[in-house]
Image (cartoon, rainbow, N blue to C red):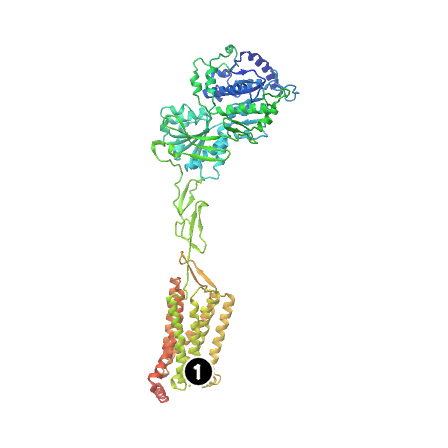
Amino acid sequence: MKHFLVSLCFLGTILHALAQCTASEFQLEGDFLLGGLFDIHHSDPVYHDRPEAMDCSSHPFLLPSYRRFQVMRFAVDEINNSTNLLPNVSLGYEIFDHCSSTQSFPDVMKLLSVNNLVQLRDEPHNNLPRILGVVGPYRSTQVLSVAPLFMKDLIPMVSYSATVSVFSKKAVFPSFLRTVHPNKDTIEGIVNILKHFNWRWVAFLNSDEDYGNDGLALFMKKIKDTEICLAYNKGLNQNTDYSQTFKQIEAQKINIIIVFAMKMTAEALIESAIQLNVTNKVWIADEEWSLNKNLPKIKGIRNIGTVIGISEQAVKVPGVNDFIYSSRRHTYCENASQNIFCSQAFIRSNLSTEDVVAADPSFNFPVYTAVYAIAHALHNALQCGSGRCNDNITVSPHMVLAELKKSNFTLLNESIRFDENGDPQYGSYSVIFWNHSGDAEEIGFYTFYPSVHFFINNSKIQWYANVEVPTSVCSLECPDGFAKKQDGNDKKCCFDCEICPNGTYVNITEDAYTCIDCKDTEWSAAGSTSCNLRSVEYIPFTDAGAILIMLGAWALVGFTLAVSVLFAINYNTPVVRSAGGPMCFLILVCLSLCSISVFFYFGEPTTSFCILRFLPFLLFYTVCLACFLVRSFQIVFIFKIAAKFPKLHSWWMKYHGQWLVITVAFGIQALLLLIGYSLAPLKPFNETVWYPDKIILGCDLDLKATSGPVLFLLSLCSLCFIFSYMGKDLPKNYNEAKAITFCLLLLILTWIIVATTYMLYRGKYIPILNALAILSSLYSFLVWYFLPKCYIMIFEPDRNTHEYFQGLIQNYTKTISQ
């Protein structure tokens, strides 16, 4: 490196001799000197290593760059003529045609030289550099190649066009500032355009160099948490096969193409699109080519589709055109042809001033601002005021840098400031549209300061083929109530649609890929976007059916009371004795107590209601069945067994076997209920399965609590049925067995109907069905067992005599004996 710098020192002596050929347009003497780097001629990177191509004047001439070059000269001229900014101080400049990084090193080293000699890093710096700051160069790659040379001495470098993100890193580029927004702001503006038109399936074509690659990286980072998908991307260079590129874009049905590339790369791409007959696309241009003056005029440009772009909002610099007209009348380097490195000798005799004035105005205001920013920093460093500046202050580049970072001045109604990264804290973007007249028409804006605001006037856009806003998606949006399901492609924009089933919904603002389950208290139909509250249903006490059933229960109690009174009056008659005597009163009391359960099937279920729905019926109905079991057994026992087993008959009569059986049955059932309810107490239960839109309030029929008592009740019923069936042929007046058998058949049939219905229907009317089943079970014994006996006692008293019953027994005995 040391040998290289020594060589450059020698090169600096050559440059001193070349300074004699510098024309006034590129050099201006002054108290303080500014450097300027403008790529007035463009050198393609492919020529960088070819010695025969070292002459910048042999490269293509760029009118926009030349115009920007004139803007810098105009800004310096304006400042020198000002009595406020730098009074009694003059600015000078040395401007070089920075046509390529490698070819322009001699110019850069001249700017860094002291007395035309380059100082090595380890040499003491006795003199200050020739310049206080540098404006330019244009391209980010050019800046990357030369910026380190200025950073080492903290010479301010204010770029008017370099937008790559790396320049915001102050640890690497401590003296770099820029008057143009970095790529991240441009990308944010482009993403806002995509969001505005709901474009999600896009291609990103970038120039394959620092500027384009940085844009691609920023774009991918920006869309990471959005619904935008990068369907295709390609780095463009001289070897790009545009035909293949467009075929791949067409194959993926991409309608939106973002072109983030240097001007010449973008021009080559668009010209290829016209030649290859690429049609009906939306092209989104970055600020490098959105204001291009040539492309909108090319024949066939309308066929490619619609061009929308983003650019630094145009700020006209007043007076610059007059300055260009005036300066074009001067003559330039007379001896340029004698020097291969005299890059200033570029002006062709056929270059018209009108062409320069009409050139692309992009980045003119940033150039103007860069010059004024350095001038204001120098103003502060020199402590200018009251019409004079302090001549006794020796200004160094790092002093200007310190003041530059604190910039806060107004220029053409813009408040110029820089943030901690040296990026501008002012300005805005214009959203432009290439109209049918070939002009870049402003259709919106994107402001950054003091607040962010984005706007596009859709009515100003004339879409290709006069269609509505074009769409660009991989998969059409799912209808309401459908969830997205990725089809195996990693891209989030490609998916299938599946309807959300009953009881679920999809909320696309939260998660468009998941069908969310509704809460237990909610329901939804298939294809829902939200859940609805379920209607809560139960049988209130005011329900007509409930009222009728409760009246039936009270009627039962009334009938049992009336029957009890009638049986008490006729207590010593044969009918009452044959019906069971005192046992009849126990049965009637238990039937009344069983009816208590009916009243707890209505109203909102609670734990106590659930217990009392079953407990009274299961407990006291067990007593009833035990009584009928004993009564059936006794009838069969007296007429068919007693004679064969006299001792058993004697024991039964001596120890009152019937009451013992009833007591044991009652105790067993009470114990089973106590154990069952202790293990699994009955509690309210919400039925949510059978009806998706309803909640049926009921009681949880836990098998642990009810299986024991129910099985015991069924056992009693079965035994009772067996004994009653055995006595079906007994004497008529003693044949209670037939009545008991019939009652039991009704009982069994009733509960079979209840069980079958419960398997097929779980609606709110189940409690009414259960209550009816209980009433039916109670009324079957009351009506078919007790009422016939009441009828005999009231309407056929002659059949309620001992003689009548004795005759029936004698006839039965004769029949048996035969």
Can you give x and y, in whole percent of width and height, for residue 629 in the image? 42, 78
Up the image or down, 757 lies above or below 313; here it is: below
For residue 788, above or below residue 110: below
Q: Residue furthest bottom?
A: 803
Drawn side of residue 789 relative to residue 41, left or right: left
Query: In the figure, 623 relative to 52: above or below?
Result: below
Quarter of the image for the N terminus: give it.
top right
- In the structure shown, which secondary structural element does the residue marked by tag 1 occupy? helix
- Observer-nearest of 139 and 63: 63
**To which residue does mark 1 refer?**
582
- Which residue is nearer to you in this view: 809 or 379? 379
The answer, for residue 430, to whether it is visible in the render is: yes
Residue 751 visible? The answer is no
User: What residue is shown at x 47% (from left), y 79% (from top)?
Assistant: 661
Q: Position of residue 572 (x, y in %)?
A: 41, 86
* Left or right position of 225 against 543: right
Q: Residues within 10 Å of mark 1 (few under 14, many from 20)?
A: few
- Name the image quarter holding the C terminus: bottom left
Q: Quadrant of residue 817?
A: bottom left
Could you tell me residue 391's position as x and y percent? 62, 19
Q: Is residue 610 left or right of residue 745?
A: right
